[in-house]
Amino acid sequence: MLLGLVLALPGPLSARAPATEAPPLAVPGLLEEHLAPEFWIQARPAPDQVILTPEQIEQQNARMVAEDESIFDLHALPARLEGTQVRAWIEGLASMPSRELFDAEGQPVEASRLARIQDNVAIDAVPATQDTRFGMVVHRADLRAFPTALRVFHSPDNSDIDRFQESTLFPGDPVVITHESADGEWYFVVSDRYAAWIEKQYVAQGERDRILARASAEPFLVVTGATASTVYTPENPRVSNVQLEMGVRVPVLADWPATRAINGQIPAAHWVIELPVRGDDGALSFEPALLPRSADVADDYLPLTEANIIRQAFKFLGERYGWGHSYNARDCSGFLSEIFRSFNVLIPRNTSRQSISPALDRLGFDENDSWDDRVAALAEARPGDMIYFPGHVMMMLGHVDGEPFVIHDTSGMSWLPDPEGELVRLRLNGVVVTPVLPMMSNRTTPTVNRITSIQRLRP
């Protein structure tokens, strides 16, 4: 087996014998059985052992809020915001790129258009002080670097990585509204893990205490599938086909009368949940909605075990890669974030912050650490451990004949079938299972050599 040869010889490149035929699934060492979560679960000595109890997770989250500067504690924000702080959030998010940009049709974006987008930020309109306004997201919505829906790219032939796309917020996410664009169509908001621009139509303003209290409302359901959607209803489009992502928590209206219809249906085959909606005046209210009993949900956060981590990760297997949660999907760090959200575990949004977070159990690497050092660390890694490289993260799955395998949301991987030949680039562009050791950053640098840290959740 090719992967078995990687450790048989001392060096990462000399260890690779020429491949005699293409791997059956294109990825070297990947077999059909590796694509089932039970393969990895059965290989673990105690897959159902709880890693952190709910109480320990609460403590872990409190530590994350206290120690990680990328996490915003909305509860702690003052009743009035200083303009200097708001401008720092806005200007700290992004500056307009100086290099040439291209639109989705591959055409250059004119400098005058970029200037109009910059003007729409209206930074000079930020007041010296302002009341702290709270809102709630009512629909999955993009977070943008600037108040525009224009998608921009670094080259005319690559429309996957939109340089203005930052992240996404989900229904029920609380935010603080800090600023409005000049055209009145966008808010600059602060959520618990990100500050960016969001379309105004997806945010409803409401009372602080009511919004913040919703996170602890009981009883509730947690989405444990990749997604779940409310039923279609022509009577109330605001709660029709609302998509809820993995880890989203929604209150349940447990005392809803069994014979009382909601939008033309009695809830005999549904849960009755409560969703936030935005009125014509922009105000927040809540309305009942029907979630099918077939939806993949739970009445509490899942126990944090290796088995559950693996099962949750595999629910995204094959999903298209979406930079900044574009394509109604997610990227490498968002993939991890949603998995851990289903256990009520809070982690930063981006790899740059996740990889250095002081609130996690971090094993760091630098130029003094060898390939052997990093491989030894991978040999000790457990399912759920997060393996970081510049700009990317993988989640540990387990080992096959001692070789580390991961699941990750990636644009692709390269490997070297023949040490004397050329790199093979695989356009994976989604959530995939891969081995780690054959991966190459370039023809002479194994990807292993670029590991910057392994972040872990430990008691």
Image: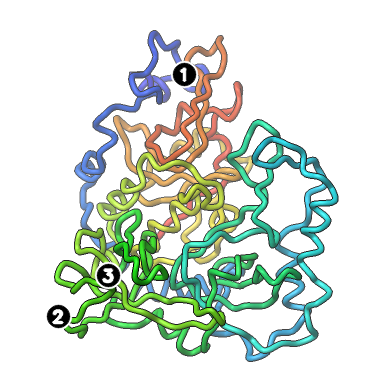
Query: Judging from the image, what secondary structure is the residue with disc 2 in?
Result: loop
Q: CA distance from mark 2 to mark 3?
A: 14 Å
Quadrant occupied by the C terminus: bottom left
Residue 358: quadrant of the picture? bottom right
Sooner in the amino-acid sequence: mark 2 or mark 3: 2
Q: Residue at x 40, y 66 (%)?
A: 345
Residue that label 1 marks: 15
Label 2 environment density (alpha carbons within 10 Å; few <14, some 14–19, many ≥20): few
Name the one closer to the observer, 200 or 370: 200
Q: x and y percent of residue 15 in the render?
A: 46, 18
Name the one closer to the observer, 372 or 23: 23
Label 2 amino acid? Answer: Thr
- Are the residues at dot 3 and dot 1 in contact (C-beta closer than 8 Å)? no
Name the one closer to the observer, 215 or 455: 215
Could one spot residue 267 in this view of the protein? yes
Which of pointers 2 and 3 indicates the residue nearer the eye? 2
Could one spot residue 11 in this view of the protein? no
Residue 370: quadrant of the picture? top right
Location of residue 296 with respect to 58 vertically, above or below: above
Q: Residue at x 60, y 54 (%)?
A: 352
Label 3 environment density (alpha carbons within 10 Å; few <14, some 14–19, many ≥20): many
Query: Judging from the image, what secondary structure is the residue with disc 1 in?
Result: loop
- Are the residues at dot 2 and dot 3 in contact (C-beta closer than 8 Å)? no
Q: x and y percent of residue 104 in the render?
A: 65, 41
Residue that label 2 marks: 259
Residue that label 3 marks: 290
Which of pointers 3 and 1 indicates the residue nearer the eye? 3
